[in-house]
Image (cartoon, grey):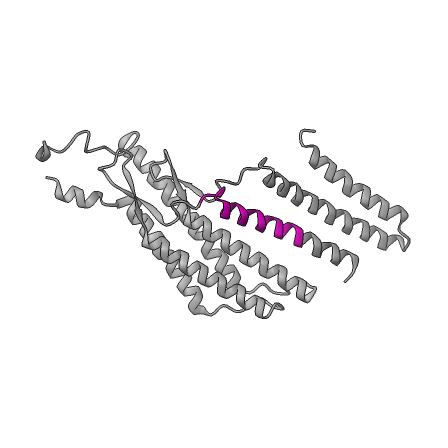
């Protein structure tokens, strides 16, 4: 390894591990808050703010698919760290579908929510 | 001259490049290449390190990196799933690239389209999510002036 390559190697190790370590540490200590990660807002006329929080299945499935896809990809790279691994089309489709479900659910709950149901009930 | 670290980094890189250009033995054309390479690497590292030190000392506040505004736009709505998954994918791809460069000693000749698709899907979700959020806030403002009506304060005739 030449001098320049060695310098690049150590620079990347220090900077990448520094950024990764800092963010991971703050996530674990709660300085970067993950509160409400699985809760979404939905339009609700009964609340003074106009919105209420609810447990979101869309967010939960997105979290699971994200962790599975990222873990699969990282394992492939660790197994053969010479090239970028090929991701099966099924994984990409699953991830895209999962994100679409999340976005659809978010749009539905924020823009419509339970307002329509209440409007239909009230005379 | 506000940011002393910035100027110190730049000056340090120039001094290193100058030392290589003057004192290191070798052909002049190679010495110029070495001076630029080392100078560039050092200044890049020091800029990155300045940001790292700023984050570590809380000069750069990243405690709200995953937060999003609430749908009403007035309160914080907690952590954002779209930001979190973008963060995960960015780190995974960066780590993969680093492992490949370290093992092969060379930058990959071709970036596979799957990686761009992966990051593209993730970043698009974040952008669309922001759009929905902004849409709900402007919708609320244009419909009600401030916030949607509170039926508890003014119940419909059937409940009176």
Q: What residue sits 19% from the left and 32% below the top?
A: B152
Q: Residue drawn 89% across and 46% down?
A: B22
Quadrant of the rendering where the N terminus of chain B is positioned: top right
Q: How many marks?
A: 0
| The C terminus of chain B, quarter of image | top left
Q: Is residue A80 above or below residue B49?
A: below
Q: Position of residue A98 (x, y in %)?
A: 38, 59
Q: Is residue B23 left or right of residue A43?
A: right
Q: Which is more toward the observer, B25 or A24?
A: A24
Q: Main structural element of the magenta stretch: helix, strand or loop?
A: helix
Image height check: is A97 above or below A49? below
Task: Give the percent coordinates (x, y) of residue B81.
Answer: 41, 50
Q: Residue at x 55, y 65 (%)?
A: B112
Viewer-closest of B46 and A101 = B46
Which residue is at the front of the view, A79 or A27? A27
Q: Position of residue A70 (x, y in %)?
A: 49, 61
Query: What residue appears at the point 57 percent right and 37 percent down from the top-left corner?
Result: B60
Q: Position of residue B114 (x, y in %)?
A: 51, 64
Residue A58 belongs to the span the image colors magenta: no
Where are the magenta residues, as a range? A13-33
In reply to whether residue A29 is colored magenta, the answer given is yes
* The image quarter in which residue A101 lies: bottom left
């Amino acid at each position: 390894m030449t001098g320049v390559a060695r310098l690049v190697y150590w620079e990347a190790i220090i900077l990448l591990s520094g950024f990764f370590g800092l963010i991971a540490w703050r996530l674990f200590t709660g300085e970067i808050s993950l509160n409400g990660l699985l809760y979404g807002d939905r339009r609700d006329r009964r609340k003074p703010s106009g919105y209420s929080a609810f447990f979101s299945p869309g967010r939960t499935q997105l979290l699971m698919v994200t962790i599975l896809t990222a873990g699969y990809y990282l394992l492939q790279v660790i197994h053969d760290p010479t090239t970028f691994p090929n991701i099966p089309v099924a994984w990409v489709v699953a991830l895209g579908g999962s994100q679409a479900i999340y976005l659809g659910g978010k749009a539905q709950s924020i823009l419509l929510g339970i307002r329509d149901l209440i409007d239909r009930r009230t005379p | 001259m506000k940011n002393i670290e910035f100027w110190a980094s730049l000056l340090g890189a120039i001094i290193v490049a100058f030392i290589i250009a003057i004192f290191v033995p070798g052909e002049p054309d190679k010495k110029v290449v070495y001076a630029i390479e080392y100078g560039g690497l050092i200044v890049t590292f020091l800029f990155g390190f300045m940001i790292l030190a700023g984050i570590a000392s809380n000069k750069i506040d990243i405690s709200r990196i995953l937060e999003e505004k609430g749908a009403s736009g007035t309160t914080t709505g907690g952590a954002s799933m779209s930001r979190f998954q973008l963060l995960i994918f960015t780190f995974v791809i960066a780590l993969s690239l680093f492992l490949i460069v370290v093992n092969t000693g060379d930058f990959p000749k071709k970036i596979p389209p799957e990686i761009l698709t992966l990051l593209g899907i993730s970043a698009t979700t974040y952008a669309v999510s922001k759009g929905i959020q902004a849409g709900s806030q402007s919708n609320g403002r244009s419909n009600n002036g401030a916030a949607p009506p509170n039926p508890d304060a003014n119940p419909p005739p059937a409940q009176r």
